[in-house]
Amino acid sequence: MSEPTQCVLIVPCSGIGKPFGTVSREAAYEVVEDLRPNQTHLVALSRLVMGDVEARTAVATCPAITLDGCKLACATKMVRECGGSVMRGFAVLDVYRRHRDLKPHGIARLNDGGLKLAHALATEVTAVVDSLVAPSCPAEIKGNSHV
Ligand code: SF4
């Protein structure tokens, strides 16, 4: 049996201007800030796109879960382009298909359905984190949950 990993990167797509993209970011924040703050670490897609060395190094060395707002799957593609391992790629649309009553509206501020959809996605992501991760992140990245 393989050793559990110590920390999982959460990479949401940027999705600016699209409710489904906003859902991916809201879900990522919920996982990293509230649900599993000691086991996860958020990487902003924009930093990977801009070639940020710290973000790209993190992606190349730690397993990632990606959250994409549409079928273009920008987060998943970028993590792979950076040499990262996508342990699980979530598409917000797939989660919405399981929760048709939670249609997201709004961009800067999601409606109630969008927030609930983000929570549903965050819950699914957390289950994957729990299946992958050791009890806490390494000390050197503790206290800095965003890359
Ligand atoms: S996956 Fe879709 S919603 Fe997300 S950044 Fe790419 S094009 Fe935008």
Image (cartoon, rainbow, N blue to C red):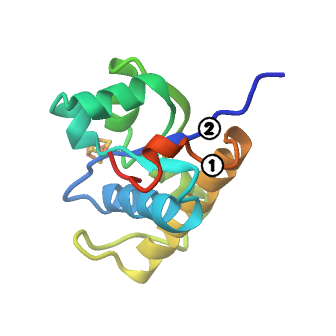
Q: Nearer the viewer, residue 95 or 134?
A: 134
Instruction: Please state which amino acid type lies under the numbered disc 1.
Output: Ser
SS of the residue under disc 1? loop
Answer whether residue 90 is visible to the viewer in this image: no
| The image quarter in which residue 131 lies | top right
Identify the residue under disc 2: 6
Q: Is residue 75 left or right of residue 31?
A: left
| The image quarter in which residue 100 lies | bottom right
Q: Nearer the viewer, residue 41 or 50?
A: 41
Numbered circles on residues, count: 2
**Label annotation for residue 103:** none
Q: Nearer the viewer, residue 34 or 19?
A: 34
Q: Is residue 115 above or below residue 131?
A: below
- Image quadrant containing the C terminus: top left
State whether label 2 is within 8 Å of ligand 1.
no
SS of the residue under disc 2? loop
- Image quadrant containing the N terminus: top right
Instruction: Please state which amino acid type lies under the numbered disc 2.
Output: Gln
Residue 51 x %, y %: 18, 28
Residue 6 x %, y %: 62, 38
Image quarter for ligand 1 equals: top left
Residue positioned 35% across, 37% down in the render: 75
Identify the residue under disc 1: 136
Answer whether residue 6 is visible to the viewer in this image: yes
Q: Earlier in the sequence, mark 1 or mark 2?
A: 2
**Circle 1 residues within 10 Å: few <14, some 14–19, many ≥20:** some
Circles 1 and 2 in contact, beta carbons < 8 Å: yes
Cα separation between marks 1 and 2: 6 Å
The residue lying furthest to the right in this view is 1
Q: Is residue 88 above or below residue 117?
A: above
Residue positioned 29% across, 45% down in the render: 44
Residue positioned 33% across, 75% down in the render: 110
